[in-house]
Image (tube, rainbow, N blue to C red):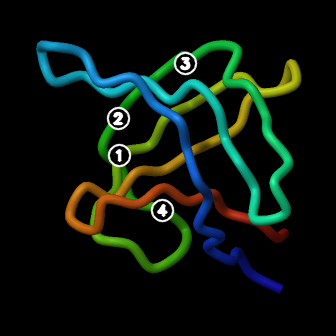
């Protein structure tokens, strides 16, 4: 089994200098998870089909998780599986 892309709703703050900070991730069932910290932001390939997304290394529920933003499609996703 490989990785699967799951699009999610994200509440984010956009700064006056153009930065984006995710604040909360919302799953399709309405469950909300607070982004406790953003540790790294980098443009890097995902393990699922995507056009060079921006990867946010976030702390959610005390654990490090990857959250991706596809600027060309203006959408967020996470990888599930494995």
User: Mark 2 highlights which residue?
Assistant: 42
Left/right placement of residue 13 relative to residue 52 reads right
Distance from label 1 to label 3 (Cα)?
Answer: 13 Å
Q: Are marks 1 and 2 in contact (CB under 8 Å)?
A: yes
Q: Secondary structure at mark 1?
A: strand
Q: CA distance from mark 2 to mark 4?
A: 11 Å
Q: Which mark is residue 54?
A: 1
Tell me which label, 4 or 1, sits earlier in the chain.
4
Query: Label 4, on which residue?
Result: 46
Check the image and name the residue furthest to the left.
17
Identify the residue shown where x is 62% and y is 59%: 8
Disc 3 is placed on an element classified as: strand
Other-residue count near label 2 (Cα within 10 Å), few / some / many at <14 / 14–19 / ≥20: few
- C-beta proximity under 8 Å, tags 4 and 1: no
The residue carrying mark 3 is 38
Secondary structure under tag 2 reads strand
Q: Quadrant of residue 19?
A: top left
Most extreme residue toward the bottom is 1
């Amino acid at each position: 089994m490989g990785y699967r892309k799951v699009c999610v709703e994200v509440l984010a703050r956009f700064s006056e200098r153009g930065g984006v900070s995710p604040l909360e991730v919302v799953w399709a069932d309405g469950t909300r998870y607070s982004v406790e910290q953003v540790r790294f932001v980098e443009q890097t390939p995902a393990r699922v089909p995507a056009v060079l997304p921006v990867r946010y290394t976030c702390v959610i529920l005390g654990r490090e998780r990857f959250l991706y933003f596809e600027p060309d499609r203006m959408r967020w996703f996470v990888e599930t599986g494995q």
